[in-house]
Image (spheres, grey):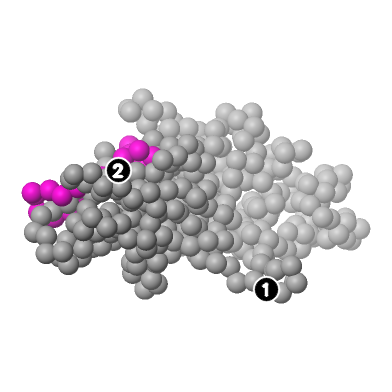
Amino acid sequence: MNDSTGKNKELRSGFTTGSCAAAASKAAAYLLLTGDAPETVDIMTPKGIVFRAEILDASRTGDSARCAVRKDGGDDPDVTTGLLIYSEVRLSGEPGVRIRGGEGVGLVTRPGLDQPVGNHAINSVPRRMIEQEVSEVLEQMDCAMGADIVISIPGGKETALKTFNPRLGIEGGISVIGTSGVVEPMSVEALIDTIKVELRQRRAEGEELISIAPGIYGLNFMKKEYGFDLDRSVKISNFVGAACDEIVKLGFRKMLLAGHAGKLVKVAGGIMNTHSHEADSRMEIIAASAFRAGASRDIIEKVLDSNTTEEAFGYLAGAGLAGQVSDLLVKRAAYYLDKRMGGEVEVECVMFVNDMGLLGSTPGAGKLIEEIKEQWKEQKSGS
């Protein structure tokens, strides 16, 4: 990122909802036991970075105290930034620390996530952080009692609609998450982790056949052409290779990759992260296949000078070669996907563009689509 002078600007890190919940819990425990609300508290994140949190909206009743910390995601475009993460701490005669969610914290309704079905979506690392901070305060204050903690996030229910939570089966709010305690700006790791979570969830629900797609681009085409709901595919963004690795690890038997030519052409060149910052070469890859299909020098030059895959395939269509080139490309895409997965998973591909519709598909793609539709149908009837 550049500043107004054109120089590189270092992106600012933030802190996770888990860190905010832990800091708020520490402050609330301190307020409950001393009667004084701290202006700030320090906690050590799992990454080894100290989080100094400003404490807001502190209040105390006879047997409980409540404090908030405002979520700051740094320079990461995080929809949860600005939300107040509250913790209410109440002493208990039962030893230990118990944690549950309140307003705005989602409830897990499907298997395969960090927490079991029925638990609030407060993940394992944040739970440990909260327990550690509160236990330390209890010990420092020489308090032999336990504590019951409720984490709440006003506005979390509405914010969750802008996240993956509804798709993952987390209902009624956002998640309290974070493995490092720190939010890295534009975190690729966080995006890949989201993809892995959904793949694990699908496998936990018994799926053996998986459909993946870069996004929902082509949603209407897939419904019209195959009666296939592309929106039910796992969205992998640009991370083809990472998704394939997880699919092998989880033991899926078959995989369908359906997507726009702009992405699949890159896969046909062995590119497993299709972001334009990582690699492009779309026109070179198309041109190579056009050469193999017998395209003239003039057509190949026009392909190489094209700005979009649609433009390139327009020239190929005019020469009567679009179908032949597309078949070569999906065959190569399937080859590289199979190579990435070591032959462990049967691979099929469908490639399209919106203006021209279906460009090409591997021989078994249609059959696998029907098998996946049947799998979804059986899941629905069994739910």
What residue sits right under mark 1 in the picture?
8
Residue 145 % position (x, y): 10, 55
Tell me which segment is drawn in magenta: 90-111
Q: Quadrant of the C terminus?
A: top left
Compute the Cα span from label 2 to label 1.
41 Å
Question: Is residue 361 covered in magenta?
Answer: no
Amino acid under label 2?
A: Gly
**Residue shown at the point (12%, 48%) measured from the top left:** 92
**In the image shown, does 271 or 93 lie closer to the viewer?**
93
Residue 379 falls in which quadrant of the image?
top left
Q: Is residue 113 left or right of residue 317?
A: left
Q: Quadrant of the N terminus?
A: bottom right
**In the image shown, does 229 or 58 lie closer to the viewer?**
58
Amino acid under label 1?
A: Asn
**In the image shown, does 48 or 372 lie closer to the viewer?**
48
Q: Which mark is residue 101?
A: 2
